[in-house]
Image: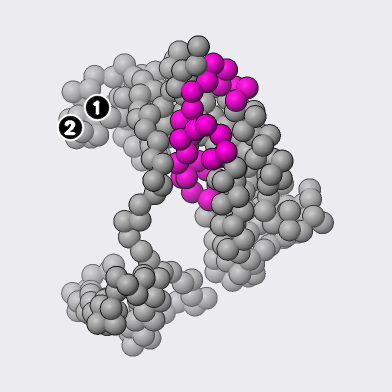
């Protein structure tokens, strides 16, 4: 009898895969995408193909470090428009299924489905995405978002992995707490100070002790992660922007206050230009620029680093 599951779909090496489709001659070669594609400049890796990852190249790594690890890798500039268009094709494909779909990023989505055989359905989704976009994905199956997200990680690449509540203990209890989605290295270290090193130990931990160390909300929440609990809601309306920014990587350090002020003003103008004119007047533009510069002047006068 069909029951409700949550799927987490994660496109495998998405940006590198898109570039490989555009440039078939790159098949099998280490690909690094980041900045303007020049590894001698400041910038970070947006993504690395599996071939590049074999050399220890990872996302968010400085391009110069990536180049040192493999000078023979193919370095390409970021083409956000191409990735966004391909992502839309994938998400449109997901919506051809009887499922609630939440777009969680360019390369991932959550789906709420009713299925008697969730693994078969996941492979049908996987194959339809492949046929329509020529991109491989991995699908994790769980009873909630936490389980599904972790399951897709276990299934990489091109796999389908099930991590439902009845499989949680045997799969997760022996792993370190840092394997949990939502627990980083710093939190894991603090848990270790309490003698909590594995997911199983976290699941069985005294919530009062956790609340004392991490706070009345965070402490019990950490214990719930250890037990594999989490929300099963899918936000079909998509992600709601809570902020807007514009960034630029300078190829040299800026030390002159006047130059810094000029660049902050320029970045502020470019950021506000992203907003629709319907909701932002020219006066609003000027006010935002003035506020940013006033904030910068205050930081300089007070000796603060922001």
Residue shown at the point (49%, 33%) measured from the top left: 99
Secondary structure category for the residue under label 1: helix
Q: Is residue 132 left or right of residue 230?
A: right
Residue shown at the point (36%, 79%) measured from the top left: 269
Residue that lies at the very extreme toward the right in this rendered image: 25
**Magenta stretch: includes residue 114:** yes
Residue that lies at the very extreme toward the bottom in this rendered image: 258
Q: Quadrant of residue 217?
A: top left
Circle 1 packing at 10 Å, graded few (<14), some (14-19), many (20+), is: many
Residue shown at the point (57%, 66%) measured from the top left: 35
* Highlighted range, magenta: 94-121
Residue 140 in view, yes or no? yes
User: Mark 2 and mark 1: span between their CA atoms?
Assistant: 7 Å
Secondary structure category for the residue under label 2: loop
Residue at label 2? Answer: 216
Q: Quadrant of residue 36?
A: bottom right
**Residue 134 pos. (x, y %):** 71, 45
Q: Is residue 289 left or right of residue 248?
A: left
Residue 300 in view, yes or no? no
Q: Is residue 145 above or below residue 267?
A: above
**Residue 132 pos. (x, y %):** 69, 44
Residue at label 1? Answer: 220
**Residues at circles 2 and 1 in contact by the CB criterion of under 8 Å:** yes
């Amino acid at each position: 009898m069909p029951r409700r599951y949550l799927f987490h779909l994660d496109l495998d090496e998405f940006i590198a895969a898109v570039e490989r489709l555009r440039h078939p001659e790159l098949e099998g070669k280490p690909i690094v995408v980041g900045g303007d594609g020049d590894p001698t400049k400041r910038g970070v890796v947006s993504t690395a193909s599996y071939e590049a990852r074999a050399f220890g190249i990872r996302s968010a790594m400085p391009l110069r470090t990536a180049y040192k690890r493999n000078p023979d890798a193919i370095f390409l500039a970021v083409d956000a428009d191409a990735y966004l268009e391909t992502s839309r094709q994938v998400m449109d494909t997901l919506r051809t299924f009887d499922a609630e779909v939440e777009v969680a990023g360019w390369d991932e989505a959550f789906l709420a489905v009713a299925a008697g055989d969730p693994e078969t359905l996941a492979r049908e989704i996987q194959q339809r995405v492949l046929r329509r976009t020529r991109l491989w994905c991995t699908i994790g199956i769980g009873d909630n978002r936490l389980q599904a997200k972790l399951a897709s990680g276990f299934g990489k690449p091109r796999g389908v992995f099930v991590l439902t509540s009845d499989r949680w203990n045997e799969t997760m209890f022996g792993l370190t707490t840092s394997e949990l989605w939502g627990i980083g290295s710093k939190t894991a270290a603090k848990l270790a100070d309490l003698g909590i090193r594995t997911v199983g130990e976290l699941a069985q931990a005294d919530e009062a002790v956790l609340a004392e160390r991490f706070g009345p909300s965070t402490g019990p929440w950490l214990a719930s992660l250890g037990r594999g609990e989490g929300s099963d809601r899918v936000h079909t309306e998509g992600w709601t922007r809570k902020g807007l920014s514009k960034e630029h990587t300078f190829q040299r350090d800026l030390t002159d206050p006047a130059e810094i002020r000029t660049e902050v003003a320029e970045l502020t103008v470019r950021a506000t230009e992203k907003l629709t004119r319907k909701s932002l007047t020219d006066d609003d533009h000027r006010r935002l620029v003035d506020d940013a510069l006033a904030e910068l002047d205050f930081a300089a006068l007070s000796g603060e680093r922001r």
